[in-house]
């Protein structure tokens, strides 16, 4: 599994917004992060859909957090950017490894159980990390 750069950018976006005393314009964020404004807006759309940030439309508008940094976890950001689908989905390739149908089913279930347990641990760890913790470490 490989995490996309969009997740790192989402984390940085939320950090930048959380340290601002006013709404932050997308052009400011894209300039600070050295990414195109159109690409940044795609990430912002995902964060808005996940109820992490909101857009204020006005002359002095921009993006603001909908929750305090202590209530935004890395899991929230991961789910917003990467989605909530399971990491591993069986492709039934194990059918080609073992001859016995019973053996195939048992091995496939075992493989998927291990992968699912690893995913749960990963998500659990992401849920423990908040934006506030990152801000406190800075």
Image: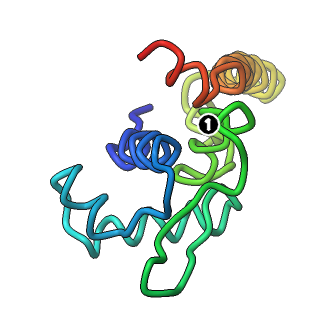
Figure disc tally: 1
Pick the quarter of the image with the N terminus. top left
**Residue sitting nearer the eye, 115 or 49:** 49
**Residue sitting nearer the eye, 73 or 61:** 61
* 19 displayed left or right of 53: left
- Which corner quadrant of the image does residue 75 belong to? top right
> Is 97 rendered above or below residue 34?
above
Percent coordinates x, y for residue 77 in the rendering: 58, 44
Q: Secondary structure at mark 1?
A: loop
| Residue matched to label 1 | 88
State the colouring used for the structure image: rainbow
Percent coordinates x, y for residue 3 in the rendering: 41, 37
- Kindly identify the residue that appears in the image at 33 percent across and 65 percent down: 40
> Is 97 rendered above or below residue 75?
above
- Kindly identify the residue that appears in the image at 31 percent across and 58 percent down: 29
**Residue sitting nearer the eye, 79 or 130:** 130
* 27 displayed left or right of 113: left
Percent coordinates x, y for residue 131 in the rendering: 58, 31
- Which corner quadrant of the image does residue 72 belong to? top right
> Is 90 rendered above or below residue 119?
below
- Kindly identify the residue that appears in the image at 78 percent across and 29 percent down: 101
> Is 31 rendered above or below residue 82?
below
* 132 displayed left or right of 110: left
- Kindly identify the residue that appears in the image at 52 percent across and 53 percent down: 81
Pick the quarter of the image with the C terminus. top left
Dot 1 alpha-carbon crowd within 10 angstroms: few under 14, some 14 to 19, many 20 or more: few
Percent coordinates x, y for residue 6 in the rendering: 37, 49
**Residue sitting nearer the eye, 115 or 119:** 119
């Amino acid at each position: 599994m490989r995490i996309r750069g969009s997740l790192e950018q989402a984390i940085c976006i939320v950090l930048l917004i959380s340290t601002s005393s006013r709404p932050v314009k997308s052009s400011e964020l894209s300039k600070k992060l050295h990414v195109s404004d159109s690409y940044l807006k795609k990430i912002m759309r995902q964060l808005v859909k996940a109820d992490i940030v909101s857009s204020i439309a006005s002359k002095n508008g921009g993006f603001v957090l909908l929750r305090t940094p202590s209530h935004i976890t890395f899991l929230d950001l991961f789910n917003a950017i990467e989605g909530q689908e399971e990491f591993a989905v069986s492709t039934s390739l194990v059918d080609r490894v073992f001859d016995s149908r019973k053996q195939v089913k048992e091995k496939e279930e075992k493989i998927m159980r291990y992968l699912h347990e690893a995913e749960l641990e990963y998500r659990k760890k992401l849920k423990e990390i908040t934006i506030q913790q990152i801000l406190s470490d800075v």
